[in-house]
Amino acid sequence: MPKKEEGEEEEEMMRVRISRKIYFPIYLMIVVLFLTLAYIQFSGKEINSLAFRAVLIFTMGAVLLTEGHRYQNLYAIDNQSIIHVRGILFKKTKRTDLTSVSDVELIQNPWQLLLNYGNVEVSVFSKDNSTNVKNINHPVEFMTFLQGKMAKKHSFSPPVRAGGKK
């Protein structure tokens, strides 16, 4: 393990993905379908094989699509920037330097507030280049971590040499 040199700080990073909580209605539909199948089975009636296959296909498709959607977006904060990576096979990375961030805004509706997930909008001086961190778990912790990194980045200023001499 290499030694840290004096003045060198350890890289602290936070990575987040979209919360599974936004898929609650889909997962609830899957549970209702399986409970309906179980009720039909235990009431002594025969389950139509086409209906059973349809429930299985719906379940597999729903799980694959929701997890695929989750893995399409990765948000990360390191010591220098906030990073948004989009895509699974073809990736597009957007990196915003922490010194150019002008505003951080937390957006939550009552449902998101109850389930502790939400959106964080990271704005630079132009609203056109803002990064929207959508539907993440614990958005307040993400925002606090980001603001701490911004404060460290803004408080550090390289030494200024008078007259341009060494």
Image (cartoon, rainbow, N blue to C red):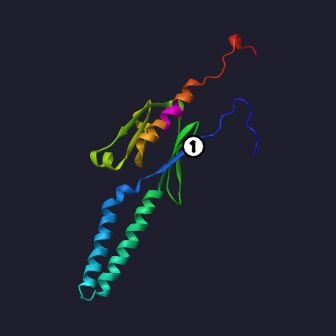
Residue 76 in the image: above or below residue 30: above
Residue 140: x and y in percent read 41, 40
Label 1 amino acid? Answer: Met
Residue 73: x and y in percent read 47, 52
Task: Count all numbered tags in the image, as a single digit.
Answer: 1
Q: Is residue 17 left or right of residue 81?
A: left
70 or 47: nearer the viewer: 47
Q: Quadrant of residue 6?
A: top right
Q: Residue at x 46, y 36 (%)?
A: 144
Q: Which residue is mark 1?
A: 13
Residue that lies at the very extreme toward the top in this rendered image: 163
User: Does the segment drawn in magenta span residue 147?
Assistant: yes
Residue 108: x and y in percent read 32, 43
Magenta residue span: 145-150
Task: Bin the neighbour count of mark 1 within 10 Å (Cα to Cα): few under 14, some 14-19, many 20 and up.
Answer: some
Residue 9 in the image: above or below residue 13: above
Residue 137: x and y in percent read 42, 49
